[in-house]
Image (tube, coloured by chain):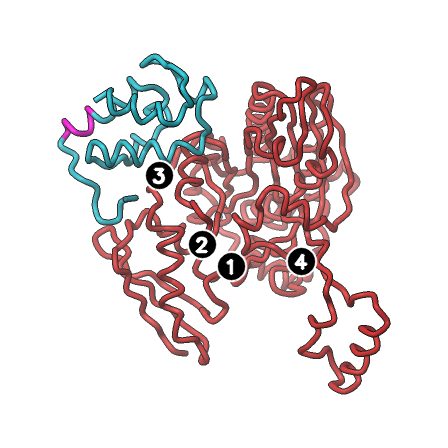
Amino acid sequence: MKDPIRSFLAQHIKGRTIQDDDDIFALGLVSSLFTMQLVLFLEQEFDFEVSGDDLDIANFRTVNAMAALAERSVSAGQGPAEEFSSR
Amino acid sequence: MPIVTVALSKPLPSGLAPELRSRLFFVSPQILDFSLVEAAGRIEAVILTTADDAAPDLADKVRRVVAADIARQKVFKSKVVWRSEAGGGSADTLSSQGDLFESLVSAGVAYEAGEGQVGFGEPLIGLMHYFDRRITQIALAMPNAQEFQYPTLLPTSVLDAFGYFGSFPHFAMFVTRLHNDIDVYESFRADYAEHGRIPETLFSHCGNHDYCLPPTMCYHTYHQLRDTTLPADRVVTAKGKSFRFEAKYYRGMERLWDFTIREIVFLGSRESVVERRDAFMRSTFALMDEFGLCGFGEVANDPFFVTQDTAGKILNQRMMELKYELRLFVDSARTIAAGSFNFHENFFGESFRIRHPDEAAITTGCVGIGLERLVYAFLCQYGLDKSKWPDSVRTGVAANGF
């Protein structure tokens, strides 16, 4: 799951190399307004909906955290977003 | 009155009802009232009570706002960061004061001067002075803090500098005047004499829109410090009249078009601004406990309206916890936001070119306390009889000369 996340981030951090546990917000690599793009990317790429308690910035700070969120949500069988989703 | 039912092509989760309700009166002045049709946790339709001459495209307008502002939003759970000692943050034990605003009007201590405009006397003035003084003391105890008195008018270019009209076009209130040209004065006077009243063509005589009414005080501060370098972290506080067009949402003293804000602006490094914003928030919550007020603090968002990316901005504010609100009970079930505690990152530093000595844009944060709302919530909880007020408030108001 990490490869597509790394690829997506690479398009937005202007050639900077990051480790999977680097906090992309704390390092100033992206603005906080990038959060929505991250949420939409994960939902579309892994076909689940981010909702409820998962709407926590801690889930989006690092490649590891995003992959863990996607893995947790997909394996929990959380289906595709419902009709009112952000897609 | 005609009723128009607007079925939503895609139902919305009921969790977005507050966001939808807060925008419907801005869709059109022809909407006189509305209700939501909800079933199984979804909003399926909006029922509008409309003016007799309602335009046929009203349903389309509602759907446009739903699509632009609501449909893409996520439903956030309430994240409470503080609960008052009084009632443990719940209003179960609150004694009802009935409709307090009506009582204030009956007692002759408040009156409705116009839509969203209220005048008031004692004991509200004494409470307002005392609460404001205590909040100002918190601000002025911070290092490098200074108080300012700002003019009421704000250059429209200030709001323009950071895209206010792109995010909150619905709140803006402009100030104009007859254009200063002898031809205009003469033609206006001729129109006025002909009609015996302000003519419908008034605005054809008013070309100027250089000034507006300030939606809040901190914009004055960024304007004041525009194009400067700050050698050290700063705190600026100001109290002033603030204005937001609230359409039909105005209500007693709970939601005004014309109100008073005590604002505290933090400018400097990211660490200091966040630390001061958080410290101020803790001090405010402690003050609410001292005043015996029942309420809570929670993560919040701004009411962006028909912007390019309302859902993204709200998601950002909520997930990064850029905004908290102090909510106080006005009856056993309803709260009003009496204050907000905000962090703006370097948005205003960039927009107004306020810089650190190394040229990097400063970061800012602010706290805004709605003084009428604070006073009103207090009176909703304790009533007009001073003997029933908490000792600290009664003695504090008296010591303040009221």
Secondary structure beneath dot 1 equals helix
Sequence-wise, the earlier of marks 4 and 2 is 2
Identify the residue at horizontal 61%, vertical 64% (top origin).
Answer: B115
SS class, disc 3: loop
Q: Disc 2, disc 3: CB below 8 Å?
A: no
Write down the chain letter for disc 4: B
Counting residues from the N terminus, which is met first, the one under dot 3 or under dot 4?
A: 3
Asked if residue B123 shows in the view, the reply is no
Residues marked 2 and 3, same chain: yes
How many residues crowd around disc 3 within 10 Å: few (fewer than 14), some, or many (20 or more)? many
Q: CA distance from mark 4 to mark 2?
A: 22 Å
* Local secondary structure at mark 2: helix
- Same chain for mark 1 and mark 2? The answer is yes
Q: Nearer the viewer, mark 1 or mark 4?
A: 4
Q: Are marks 1 and 4 in contact (CB under 8 Å)?
A: no
Quarter occupied by residue A56: top left
Farthest bottom residue in view: B194
- Which amino acid type corresponds to the residue marked 4 in the rendered image? Phe
Upstream in sequence: badge 2 or badge 3: 2
Give the residue at mark 3. Answer: B76
User: How far apart are the two marked residues, 3 and 1, measured between alpha carbons?
Assistant: 23 Å
Q: Which residue in the structure is indicated by mark 1?
A: B249
**Pointer 1 with pointer 2, Cβ within 8 A:** yes
Residue B177 placement, left or right of B75? right
Chain A shown in which color? Answer: cyan
Vertical arrangement, residue B358 with respect to residue B63, above or below: above
The boundaries of the magenta stretch are A71-76
- The residue identified by callout 4 is B174
User: Disc 2 marks which residue?
Assistant: B22
Give me the C-alpha separation between circle 1 and circle 4: 19 Å
